[in-house]
Amino acid sequence: MHQDTTVCPQLGAVSAPALVVPTEEEEPPGTGLCPQGAMVRPRGQSALHNGVPLARERVARTSLPTRRFRRRFYPEIDDKTWNDWQWQVRQRIRSLGQLDAMLRLSDAERAVLERPEGKLPVAVTPYYLSLVAPGDETQPLRRTVIPCAGELVQLPGESDDPLGEEHQSPVPGLVHRYPDRVLLLLSDFCSTYCRYCTRSRVVGHGGISPSRGRLQAAMDYIRANPRVRDVLLSGGDPLTLGDERLEWILSRLRQIRHVEIVRIGTKVPAVLPQRITPKLVRLLRRYHPLWMSLHFTHPDECTPEAYRACARLADAGIPLGSQTVLLKGINDSVPVMAALMHHLMRMRVRPYYLYQCDPISGSGHFRTPIAKGLEIIRGLRGFTTGYAVPTYVVDAPGGGGKIPLMPEYAVGHDAGGDMLLRNYEGGLYRYPDGCPEHRPPRLH
């Protein structure tokens, strides 16, 4: 199939992937979303080529790696069971024996997995493990979920709580850093544990439970602080809670009159898209204005399942933004980051933040120099739509908050008072800065 290709100096050649046409039994019962961004027409409506109807386009319900993985390791599991999010959580791959049976572990990976102690447990949903390369320890997704020796090394400047959250926590599980908003950790549970997790000191260890007593204490604190207008729900992953518990939390927050906005930070659409059920979406849309920050790391996460999950959320009127962590050897190049941002745009997810990796203990093998992040922003700005360019931020160690960083586009003023600006191609342009009466006259 012919592929259209565009070329730019920064991104290189970027091809539009061909449409995936699955076998008949994999065709969804109705219209769906094509991960490649091709238009999907309503049932019964044919495409036209030179006025001649073509066969109705069909869209894969899942990717080829996932189909192969299921045939090999879960041949007896039907589609209904596989797509049950609670089954996916119960069947998480957590032990060395399970990983050894499904992946060709390297000696280095095996050595870390054999250690009884660890700062962060290992757990991966069957769905997400199906996207992991079984024989390549350097594959980006594999490096984000399978431990390596690097996370056992603590470098200077690293700490278990680099953002100082524990010193800004007036009640257990609630962080109050900014004047008008708080972070509420609902639990410490995730369906899949990312090796670069900022909260690896608490996530997965059972210390933060979604008990009503603890959550009620957090609600009481929010109610007593009328300056708080924005509540971010995080964890752990809030969407791993059941519908009833999640609704209890949302309904209590909506009873606090000065809480204007509720946000949910989640990686579920990437690692457990089966959780985004029609029932969940109906629940969430009752509590608008509700926003979501989604955590996508690499284009390989942008599967048909992820597209459908985001479509359900977007169709429910939930604004979606992405928060991507910059990771060495995983997404630290302009072409990879551009591909991810373009996927997000097609999924109706607005690229929001590109995070410099926090200096958590054992994160040195993931962290890039800040110059790399600036290089990526410079390689995106002007070469793709501005909507696809996230804000590059450093979350200041010690609790200083998010600090945005940008390449130097403002060069300075010339002798005549004009501002010199550098555009995305490196060209210099003058802008008449300031009010005319404040600018010195220019000699002709």
Image (cartoon, grey):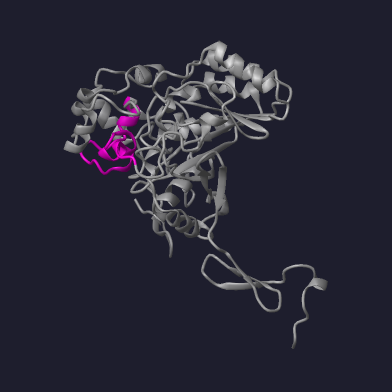
Residue 444 relative to residue 86: left or right: right
323 in relation to 67, above or below: below
Image location (x, y in percent) of residue 58: 41, 36
Q: Number of labelled discs?
A: 0
Image location (x, y in percent) of residue 214: 55, 15
Front-lying residue, 435 or 47? 435
Q: Which residues are magenta?
A: 126-154
Q: Is residue 271 magenta?
A: no
Q: Is residue 153 magenta?
A: yes
Front-lying residue, 369 or 391? 369
- Most extreme residue toward the right is 437
Residue 20 relative to residue 437: left or right: left
The reply to whether residue 43 is in sight is no
Front-lying residue, 263 or 198? 198
303 in relation to 336, above or below: above
Residue 391 relative to residue 29: left or right: right
Q: Residue at x 60, y 14 (%)?
A: 216
- Most extreme residue toward the bottom is 444
- Most extreme residue toward the left is 107
Residue 122 relative to residue 334: left or right: left
Q: Residue at x 64, y 16 (%)?
A: 252
**Quarter where residue 358 is shown:** top left
**Quarter where residue 121 is shown:** top left
Image location (x, y in percent) of residue 36: 42, 44
Front-lying residue, 363 or 377? 363
In the picture, the quarter occupied by the C terminus is bottom right
The reply to whether residue 315 is in sight is yes
Image location (x, y in percent) of residue 268: 45, 29
